[in-house]
Image (cartoon, rainbow, N blue to C red):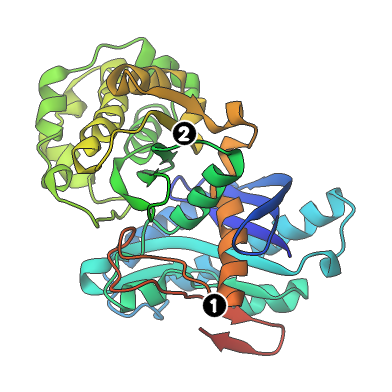
Amino acid sequence: MRALGLMSGTSLDGVDIAVLETDGDTIEAFGPTGYRPYSQIERAMLQDALAEAISLTDRTARPGVLACAETMITAAHAEAVEAFLKGHGLMPRDIDVVGFHGQTVLHRPQARLTVQIGDGHALASRLGITVVGDLRAADVAAGGQGAPLVPAYHQALVQRLGLAGPIAVLNLGGVANVTLVDDGAAPRAFDLGPANALLDDFMKERTGEGFDRDGFTAAAGEVDEEALARLLRHPFFDQPPPKSLDRNDFRAWTDEQGGLSEVTLETGAATLTALTAAGVAVSRRFMSSAPRLWVVAGGGTRNPTLMAMLSERLAPAEVTAADALGFPADYVEAQAFAYLAVRALRGLPLTYPSTTGVPSPLTGGVIFKADTLVRI
């Protein structure tokens, strides 16, 4: 099947688009990729939606700005797909299914609550293509963490590349997560800690720019080792998997323990970058075998300072960006949601006890067509 995956992550920067040829088991071919950035107004609305969502107890409720944000998210994804198809000379009939993650605004698996905004039925009706969305809900309802959701794709990717394990596939979005793929074993996966979210927010507050471009600011600073040691005492780092994070879970802790408001811009950026690398390194205590290779995907690969810190802390293992292996590091999650959409259509598992802690392998998602929906 030819599937199109859509991902809007915790970095709140825009919509990633990727086409994948797959039967939901093996990856047959990689297709084109694309990106639709959010405007400043759209990003501000999403920030407001995150703040509004903190008080949610009903995953279907859309009070206040959340209703407007959901309409905006749906329209932005539709516009992204329409422009992408036109740009690549494709028609809606050329796509069998769209995997639609939506935008996570709240993730509280301990309360069996995860909220992704985005109207799958409206998207399917506008595009005229079957959409599979709401992919986390079934796992969380069954007692799983609902994240990470992409380890099945990571395993298929490692198999396609013919890499011998153990291999760690590390995603550096707003939150960091890892999948350990070893020959013949079920994938093991969990969230590791903050990745780009804390640094992006820090840079936004200090400079007005929502990221550390090319890691230049962190490279110019010195890591506050005492602050880093305090931040690494967060109980999440000692919690065994399965475990997952909301984008803002570390914000209060960082404000209380980091003391970053009292340091220079460069020191703050260096310390938060080091926190991401150190969080990845300490996660190795929960791995049954030491990865020989770390394949890194996500926005963090564009930060050379972070990649250098990872290489130093994970030695003697090799650390490489996904691009070096022939697939686009920025679009792995979009590809994954294309893959998961096909698995959902086929009733194949999306999550496993070793990835989210769900009691048994579980499929999920809701199938949206222009005039119907089917829950699975």
Under tag 1, what secondary structure?
loop
- Residue 144's image quarter? bottom left
To which residue does mark 2 refer?
A: 296
Q: Nearer the viewer, mark 2 or mark 1?
A: 1
- Which sits in the foreground, 288 or 226? 288
Q: Residue furthest front?
A: 184
Q: Position of residue 335 (x, y in %)?
A: 61, 52
Residue for point 32% across, 16% down: 312
Alpha carbon separation for disc pair 2 and 1? 29 Å
| Amino acid type, callout 2 | Val
Q: Position of residue 187 (x, y in %)?
A: 39, 53
| Amino acid type, callout 1 | Gly
To which residue does mark 1 refer?
A: 347
Q: Position of residue 264 (x, y in %)?
A: 26, 17
Residue 119 seen: no
- Which sits in the foreground, 240 or 160? 160
Under tag 2, what secondary structure?
strand
Mark 1 is surrounded, within 10 Å at the Cα level, by few (under 14), some (14 to 19) or many (20 or more) other residues, namely some
- Residue 136's image quarter? bottom left
Residue for point 65% across, 32% down: 326
140 left or right, relative to 151? left
Residue for point 36% across, 45% down: 177
